Amino acid sequence: MVDTPRILFADRSPQDQSSCMQLFEETAPGKVLLCNNISELSDTLTGNNIDLLFLDLMLSPEDDCLTQLDTIQQDYPDLLIVAAIPQGNHTLEQEILNRNLFFYVTTPYDDTEIQLALKRSVAKLNLQQAQLPEDSQKRKPAFYGLIGETAVMQNLFDLIRKVSEDDFATVLIRGESGTGKELVAKAIHLHSSRKNKNFVPVNCAAIPDDLLESELFGYTKGAFTGAAQNKIGRIQYADGGTLFLDEIGDMKPSLQAKLLRVLQEREFEPVGGLKATPVDTRVVAATHCDLEQLVAEGKFREDLYYRLSVIPIQIAPLKDRKGDIPILLEAFLDLHATKRGREKFTIPKNVMTALLSYEWRGNVRELENLVQQMSILYSGREIRLEDLPPRILTDFDPENVDNELINDILTGLASSADNTVIDVSQSNTEPPGDDEWEDGQVDFKKLINDYESQLIIKAMKMTKGNKKEAATLLNLKRTTLLEKIKKKNLQGMWQ
């Protein structure tokens, strides 16, 4: 057990640190270290074996805070992080939800929220400590937020590593909507020597054509009506870092020509400017469109296409890597159940079969949205087929599924050390057949005893061996549960 966790409380305000210290001492007694700037944060993390980082994201300027957070996650993958973000900053909140953080709170600090974060953190640390002997069986950690153990995803991670070694060549990421193109772009940035500079995303489809040019290139004072002062564009803001151009296929031809010059000459001119400005920016583009078809139709410049696709990366749709669905479910449930302080739901085999049979046209994004929905509606209970959205059940036929694929996935899942959400076990207790009733062979006591044993084992699996929580699930006294486990000789059967 982690009786005295080492906690680093990084916050800009000494007053906030002082007012929160009592809560830390009462809720998570241990050694608490303090820092109030980025330099101290880096030094303290380096020189101490920190278990939990309570991080005020505004310790860095808002434009840099996510880059700093990504760097910490990369350098300390086992560190438990509770992030503090300004209340009402929905953009930053969404960015936090896209990352694999353990918990977040809002500022100004609320005592109850801090206590909940600390209690859950200590519980998580204790659980991790209890599972240390099984480290060799644990799943591979997320790769900069990308999750996947299938061969196609491991190949993608290897490609990202190779691409990141050369931080000048342009990259074109292709994949269906919802596959995680921006996460791949961020991974390339964070794994490269540019990681300490800005990662600047631009959605070319979301910004009107008449504004996209000034957003990318900036403008000079007086360039047009309303240009009262100079404005730095996204390209210049990404100097030394990475510019991510999402949905590049939607960029109008006149801007394509200006972007081509940036790639060829490594310089740009702001709107209304007369002098070119040099820039060292790596460009990573992404699209779900067929750019070759757009080139053939004259809607996309051929020379720009070849400039962008120096290194092409294709992301597989979720339907082609269904073996990753169970671990994605686990990861998203950890995220959304923790955020809302809810109990996890569980997924029986028949529901898992339906999820594995679905085509997932919205890919990983659709899967995460489903987990978020079910975390709200079905907290703490087992999901039933009828709980799933109609679109998933429309074409689902239990008698006509890819049994070979599903059995392979469930067999691997059954042997996983981290299998608390998905219950792939099947009951061995079946009602007696007609012939048994006729012959008087029904052994009532044995059937009840077997079913009772299965309930206990399942409850112990769901609570990871916590007998008090298992007793609560079964609506039993803890002493009664202990007696039944001993009497039935069930010790360790849930592991």
Image (cartoon, rainbow, N blue to C red):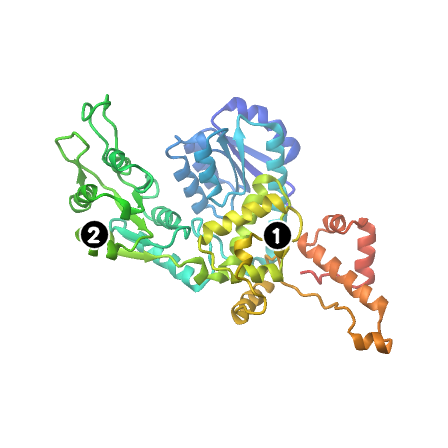
Task: Residue 145: give x, y in percent of width and height.
Answer: 45, 49
Q: Residue at x 71, y 63 (%)?
A: 493
**Which residue is pictured at 47% across the width and 28% down the height?**
36
- Which label was assigned to residue 216? none
Q: Name the foreground residue: 376 vs 293.
A: 293
3D distance between C-alphas at marks 2 and 1: 48 Å
Provide residue 91's location: percent of width, then percent of height. Answer: 43, 35
Q: Residues within 10 Å of mark 2 (few under 14, many from 20)?
A: some
Q: Position of residue 119 (x, y in %)?
A: 63, 38
Q: Residue at x 41, y 42 (%)?
A: 71
- Sequence-wise, the earlier of marks 2 and 1 is 2
Relative horizontal placement of residue 143, taking residue 119 as reference (left or right): left
Q: Is 175 situated left or right of 478 in this image? A: left
Q: Nearer the viewer, residue 308 or 194?
A: 308
Label placed on residue 307:
2
SS state under label 2:
helix
Marks 1 and 2: in contact by CB < 8 Å? Answer: no
Dot 1 amino acid type: Asp
Quick check: 272 above or below 421? above
Name the front one of labels 2 and 1.
1
Residue 29 visible in image: no
Residue 401 vertical placement versus 303 (above, below): below
Relative to the observer, which residue lies in front, 475 or 71?
A: 475
Q: What's under tag 2, amino acid-wise?
A: Arg
The residue at 81%/60% (across/down) is 486
| Quadrant into which the C terminus falls | bottom right
Is residue 267 at all visible to an observer of this figure?
A: yes
Judge whether 125 appears above or below 106 on screen.
Answer: below
The residue wearing badge 1 is 387
Q: How many marks?
A: 2
Residue 433 in percent (x, y) is at 77, 74
- Other-residue count near label 1 (Cα within 10 Å), few / some / many at <14 / 14–19 / ≥20: few
